[in-house]
Image: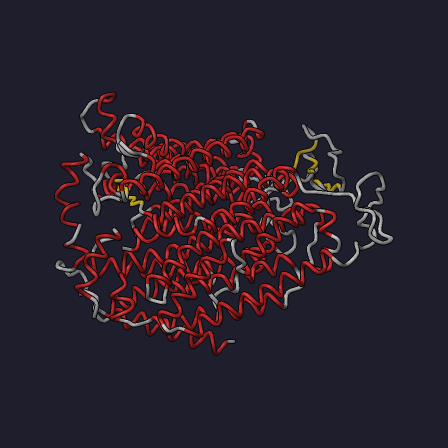
Amino acid sequence: MNNYPAIVVIAPLLGALFAGVAAWVEDRATYPIALASLGIAAAAAVNDLITVMISGPIQYNMAGWAPPMGIEYRIDGLNALVLVLITGIAFLNLVASYKNVQQETPDRSGSFYVMYLLFVVGLVGVVSTGDLFNLYVLIEITSLSSYTMIALGDKDRGAIASLNYIFIGVIGASFYLLGVGYIYIKTGSLNMADVAAMIPAMTESSTLLVAFILCIIGVWIKMALFPLHVWLPNAYAFAPVGFARIVAPLMTKVMVYVMVRLMVSVFGYDYIFTTLSLSDGVVWMGTIAILAGGIIALSQKNLKKMMTYIIVCEIGYMVGGAWLGNELGMTGAILHIVNDALMTFALFLAVGNMVYKLDRVDITDLQGLFAKMPWTMGGFVIAAFSIVGVPPTCGFFSKWYLILGAFEAGAYHFAAALLVSSLICAVLFFKVFEVCFFEPMSEGHGHGDDHGHGHDSHGEHAAVAIEEAPVASVITLAVVSVSLIVVGLYSGTIVDRIILPFLN
Amino acid sequence: MKLVGFIIVCLTGGLLLYGTGELPAWGDPNSPASTHLSDDYITLALEQTEAPNLVTAVLADYRGFDTMFETAVVFCAGLACFLLLRDFRPKKDHYYRHVPTGVMLHVKNEARTVRTGREFEDMDREWVPSDTIIKTVCRILIPFIQIYALYVVAHGDFSPGGGFQGGVIFGSSLILLAISYNLKTLVKRVTEKFLGVFSSLGVLVYVGIGAIAMALGGNFLDYGKYAPIFGEHHIRALGMLGVEIGVGMAVTAVMVIIYINIVSEGRHDEGL
């Protein structure tokens, strides 16, 4: 019996509950428990991916009841890929953020890890499930845990940011739930495959149309598609570093996954692109999101805020790509889910390292950072290149697929927006690099240190002592940065072996 | 902005109305929702699960996986209250009451300067003189409420009820204790550590029953795999009872955690 699909979800859940007991009995045990359970989940996810690549989709019946009576997990190329991504990032972030958690929530770090695990449970559950209502329940867990974690962040503004997020997030989730309700009234089923089989017979139904619109808008709110993004920048910028590093790369990307899943496995291409022919309008929305996200990012003074607007911009890429209505565009969107999660993770790791040392990360605070934190900045540069789309980093390849898809669909405006946003990101990051590299260290930051560093030859500045973030964070950042290039080089393999078999 | 909001509300309302056009008639026995799966549940549930309560069979067995995560949501809510509200800082001031005279002292000092005992007693800021009638009635009532709560939990798989309802009733009996006496009385009897551990344990019972089924060679939550240990008879209903108990534990603890943290602003010393 292959139980790995369940283990991916159950391991972190059991971990959360054991850690929940441990937090009251022996606080120091929570961290190893969290680490171990995420390690097991990641191993199970990798196993799933290998099984899917060798022998095709895995079907798993919860409680032994066959769908549509029971709840099923259906692991195919797409979710196996995203599961590996989620568990991998969650595990690495836990390794990297130990010191940050100690710094930010010293008196309740045990419960922090419990909440962290519950958040991961929600994400992997959303991705694994083949049941529309089960998906909603898991969205509830992710949302509830992220509301809490964000409110734990910045002392003055974390709670307000979280409250904003709650209001808008609850509306998004309710829209989705309402949509599922309409689907249930019309079909009598909650199982995705079961519903998908019934939809071709009822394409003219107004109820189905309303269900579709409600589900998609709900998911758009949750993924912060412009102009529904207003909750995101503050929520992510004021979250505690240990959590921002995982919520920023994963939450929005998982919601993009949900959108792709609804499009491919529930409503179907025929319904969306032939019956409703929605492609043009939504690709325009994606285009606007890309441009708006980029331009607002350009006007930000704070590095964290800037990164959050880059997320808004990247969401435009994926939504636009998925709705181009051709295989290239969808391939690009799915590949970009993986790439963008990794790039954003690398960026937030780097920013988190800066926050650990500097506390405030307005762009003007970053002077002389290349000398002070060379490793962190190295990772930051690679991540930035990837966002801009410089080959051979992975960001280039997904953008390439998206542009090809745009040309095939005749959506030249979308292709143009992709290129313009690359330029905007280039300007954006070089502005940051300029401050970090050329402007001298501000008074009070540098500690004179003359013995034997060899850096002290340029001008009258004394050599700056290297003050790096904790070793674990730096090593994780190095691993993730290298993975950006490795994933870029193996893009072809990912597309041929995983994404195309899923789409066909 | 108000106008934009108004337009959005109108559009959403219009969309919902448009969607209702094709809905089946109220109570239509031929609607998809009543024909597609419901027939199977109604005809097969008793035979397959041996639980006479159809609702529980769907909730705790066919869709037991959902219910497990609903319990996790409840746990998550309790934990969120603890994480966000709990305040470990020492209190800035204390209130005492001189028992023989009824005079109230307000000491603005972090340390406890007045020794409480026969002469002085601790007092809350919003102090209400304790009423013997209320105290006595509640003291007699609480054990009966608790017995009833256990009954509701235990009969979940046979009659209406179950872990969520029973847990809420049990939790409210503890809250009644806090209201009729004071918060300190409750916190002394049911400590924070106990509640924290108990809420995790409740969900752990549920997940554990599922995980052990997996270890016994079945799918996750497949209660039927316990047959070699507990016998074939009513094994799935027994599994449901097990998870209901877990749900009851978690809900009870989380109710009290939320109550204590909210009324005392995270201080766990005084409040309603």
Specify whether residue B104 is in view: no
Q: Nearer the viewer, residue A387 or A82?
A: A387
Q: Quadrant of the C terminus of chain A?
A: bottom left
Residue lying furthest top in this view?
A: B229
For the N terminus of chain A, give its image quadrant.
top left
Q: Say which residue appears at 67% left-offset and 34% top-offset.
A: B99
Q: Quadrant of residue A273?
A: bottom left
The image shows residue B45, relative to residue B27, as above or below, that is above
Q: Does residue A472 appear left or right of residue A464 in this picture?
A: left
Q: Is residue A5 visible?
A: yes
- The correct choice, above or below, for B232 with respect to A44 in the image is above
Rendered residue at 22%/30% (across/down): B224
Please tell me whether residue A106 is drawn above or below residue A26 in the rendered image: below
Where residue B144 sits: x, y (%)? 37, 33
Instruction: Kindly identify the residue that appears in the image at 66 percent across and 50 percent down.
Output: A377
Q: Is B183 on the left or on the right of B59, as rendered?
A: right
Residue A149, given in percent of the width and then of the height, sits at: 54, 48
Q: Nearer the viewer, residue A414 or A251?
A: A414
Query: Whole-percent x and y of residue B138?
Result: 45, 37
In this view, the residue farthest toward the right is A460
Q: How is the image coloured?
A: secondary structure
Q: Nearer the viewer, residue B266 or A434?
A: A434
The residue positioned farthest toward the bottom in the image shown: B3
Q: A308 or A234: nearer the eye?
A: A308
Image position, residue B199 (x, y; %): 45, 35
User: What residue lies at 24% left-to-right and 52% top-to-bottom?
Assistant: A193
Q: How many marks?
A: 0
